[in-house]
Image (spheres, rainbow, N blue to C red):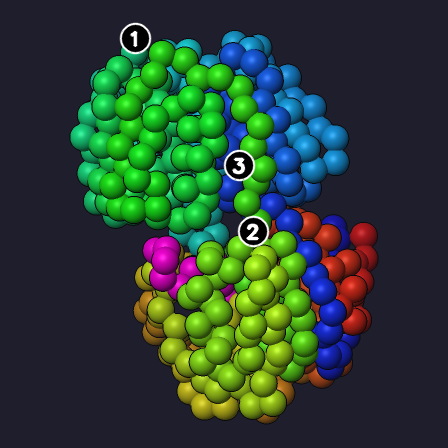
Amino acid sequence: MDKIIVEGGRLLTGDVHIGGAKNAALPILVSALLADGPSTYDNVPGLQDIISVVNLLTHLGVEVRREGNRVTIDGAGLSNHEAPYDLVRKMRASILVLGPLTARLKKARVSLPGGCAIGARPINLHLKGLAQMGAKIDLQHGYVEASADRLRGAEIYFDTPTVTGTENLMMAAVLADGVTVLRNVAREPEVVALADALNSMGSQAAGAGTSVLTITGVEALRPAQVSIIPDRIEAGTFLVAAALTRGDVTICDCDPAHLVATIDKLRMVGADVQINGNRVRIQGPDRINSVDIKTQPYPGFPTDMQAQFMVLMSVACGLSVISETIFENRFIHVSELRRLGADVRVSGNAAVVRGCAKLSGAPVMATDLRASASLILAGLVAEGTTEVNRVYHLDRGYEAIEEKFSGLGAAIRRIR
């Protein structure tokens, strides 16, 4: 099993290029199921989760070709309505095929994805919405079975904003009969990117980026060519790394509009952040100020940046409180940060971080995707050697992260 070795104490400098967003690419690739013909997607990152969704799409009968960062998916071959457990268990986002399969094949059988390290993330809102659109829903032997001659438009209210729930019902609604109104939806850039991709295929979706989405169903969609938006969490991770090491780094090929909450907090800790088009330059402060963090749905501070910011606060001057409001188990990286010398105390959904003078390298174990990134960040600033084990989590969301950090001057290597 791979592990990453980091020698701390290096100042990061230079340019780093950001890849396509995993959380945008996954639903957009799945949306190819809705069209009868080949759709082409550019700027697709080379990640394990992308491999997993490609394997699932291939199982459903569609032809998938990949050339570098370009993926072509021909939905004409869609013939299988079942997403089996062995494929779905590898990636929770596989549940996204439920809406498109029900809309196009009139039936779907998709394995329940189960829980994960950072929380249960139930799909009850997905099922409730499909039922309101006229689908018959059965739960049998660990599978969701949905069927409908044709879905019909409905007015659906989400009790709480859900990204995958919004995306699933949006894809179901584009081929439904009539108008669907989704209220209290997720507003993340990845949701907007999916709406833009669907509209380029001929759908009529309006309101993406607001709390209300209106979709007028059409008879059929056409193939399209789409470029995946930059990954705001990868960009945020490198921004924090630069601030953490008191470095001078320019983040290239990003969308600063998607980074407002993260950049605001970095300026509060004392970093100098300058924006120029699709480039963000950050110069880390000599003294890192402590700030409080509260994760919230977009446009609030992203839960996917909480672990990285905790590392930054662990070497800040003073006391900070980090409140996690999205996932109930997203402090499981704390025990590993403590092994490196971080002073963190958890009480319920809040963590109190007392900044310390230094961290010390040690062997640590990654527990999930963002925890993996946080441990590498901690290793960059820790004295001595940090060994991050179980980095297969990391490969789900960061492409060649050790190579990118090495290009900025970090002493980092992967041992296979």
Judged by depth in the image, the label closer to the viewer, 2 or 3, is 2
Which is more N-terminal, label 1 or label 3? 3
Which is more N-terminal, label 1 or label 2? 1
Dot 1 corresponds to which residue? 149
Which percent across, then down, holds residue 202? 42, 22
Which is more N-terminal, label 3 or label 2? 3
Along the viewing direction, whichever of 259 and 109 lies nearer the viewer: 259
Badge 2: residue crowd in 10 Å (few <14, some 14–19, many ≥20): many
Which residue is located at x 60 percent, y 18 percent?
38
Which residue is located at x 29 percent, y 28 percent?
215
Which percent across, then down, holds residue 1? 74, 50
Question: Where 196 sits versus 319, above or below?
Answer: above
Whether residue 58 appears in this view of the structure is no
Distance Cα–Cα, label 3 vs label 1: 27 Å
Three-letter residue code for mark 1: Asp
Badge 1: residue crowd in 10 Å (few <14, some 14–19, many ≥20): some
Three-letter residue code for mark 2: Asp
Dot 3 corresponds to which residue? 26
Which residue is located at x 36 percent, y 58 percent?
299
Distance Cα–Cα, label 2 vs label 1: 38 Å
Along the viewing direction, whichever of 314 and 31 lies nearer the viewer: 31
Whether residue 157 appears in this view of the structure is yes
Which residues fall within the magenta stretch? Answer: 297-307
Where disc 3 sits, the SS reads helix
Distance Cα–Cα, label 2 vs label 3: 12 Å
Where disc 2 sits, the SS reads loop
Q: Is residue 317 left or right of residue 44?
A: left
Dot 2 corresponds to which residue? 231
Q: Is residue 190 left or right of residue 174?
A: right
Badge 3: residue crowd in 10 Å (few <14, some 14–19, many ≥20): many
